[in-house]
Image (tube, rainbow, N blue to C red):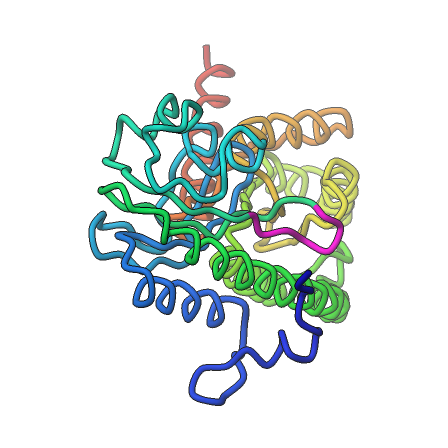
Amino acid sequence: MGTSPPVDEVLMISRAGTAFESFADASRAAVEHLQAAHGMGLWMVTRTTGDDWIVLEAADSRYDVGPGALFRWSDSFCSRMVAGEGPAVAPDAAAVPAYAAAPIAGQVPIGAYVGVPLTLADGSLFGTLCAIDPHPHDERLAAAGCEAGLLGRMLSTLLSHELEADAQAQRAEAAEREAAVDALTGLPNRRAWDRALEAEEARCRRYGVSAAVCIVDLDSLKEANDDHGHAAGDELLRTTAAALTGAAREGDVVARVGGDEFGVLLLGCDQDEAATAAARFEHALELAGVAASAGAAPRSPAASLSAAVTAADEAMYARKLGRRAAVAT
């Protein structure tokens, strides 16, 4: 019986004798090799999170699918393969009932399929290494399945080690943010916020993880300063910082990004969670006696966290105008 290659060997999977610098590089080489060796129309490395199925790397000759493409996990052959409802290698996909009934079979032509899971160190599912072709194949496709299985185990091992290194980098980033703080509130300052966004955007692109942004703007800081002095305004800012930190989840980044503006970077936050984030933070501030407007937006796999910041800012201003209109009436 074959065994998985040792870690040192995995980490030295190479192209032209040079060690790969990342899981992304190794994934790209794997799909390009499998495409050239076995002639399928599309090989992909994917990530699944919730019902999102995100293409991280692709070697495509038939389907016009590239990195960043987003599909529904529940529609896919891979979801059925992982659940044990269909085989890892299907030379004639239409002959497999679970695959024939999958919604994706009605969306694109799939005559043959190969798929293997990519797993994390704890055994949980990360995504898949998979392939489809518009035409059925013969039984020689089993060789592609065997090779994909070996490469999938290698990629899973490399991924687990890279994610552990990434977790260490995240801890270092958190320590760096603590050193770049706003003196009044003790929160990360604008410089630290920009660095956090940049680092998380790179992480989202590399691993297909989700994230969202919430922007919070105080409604009455100027009035507090004018009516009660700057000491009262400073206390309002400190109260806001404490309320937002208390309402944030572990790992989220709360920062003071302007005079009366705060940002929250919500890690691993999907679209549904982002939709409720603004209301959650507004409620926490209301309980603390702080009037504020909040807007949130998720990162889109086709866009970036920078676009999410813009969308969250626009949502916050729309919310602020709505609150003012409600007070006026």
In depth, the one of 328 and 263 nearer the eye is 263
Spot occupied by residue 233 in the image (x, y as percentages of width and height): 71, 45
Asked if residue 250 lies left or right of residue 218, the reply is right
Residue 41 in the image: above or below residue 291: below
In the drawing, does residue 224 fall left or right of residue 235?
left
| Residue at position x 66%, y 28% in the image | 280
Bounds of the magenta span?
A: 117-123
Would residue 190 be visible to someone looking at this image? yes
Quadrant in the rendering for residue 3: bottom right
Quadrant holding the N terminus: bottom right
Is residue 13 shown above or below 158? Answer: below
Q: Position of residue 327 (x, y in %)?
A: 51, 16
- Please indicate whether residue 198 sits to the left or right of residue 236 in the image: left
Closer to the camera, 257 or 289? 257
Q: As rendered, which of 51 and 317 lies closer to the eye?
A: 51
Residue at the extreme bottom: 17
Q: Position of residue 19 (x, y in %)?
A: 54, 84
Residue drawn where x is 73% and y is 56% of the image: 121
Relative to 38, residue 253 above or below:
above
Q: In terms of depth relative to the viewer, which is nearer, 102 or 100?
A: 100
The residue shown at (26%, 52%) is 41
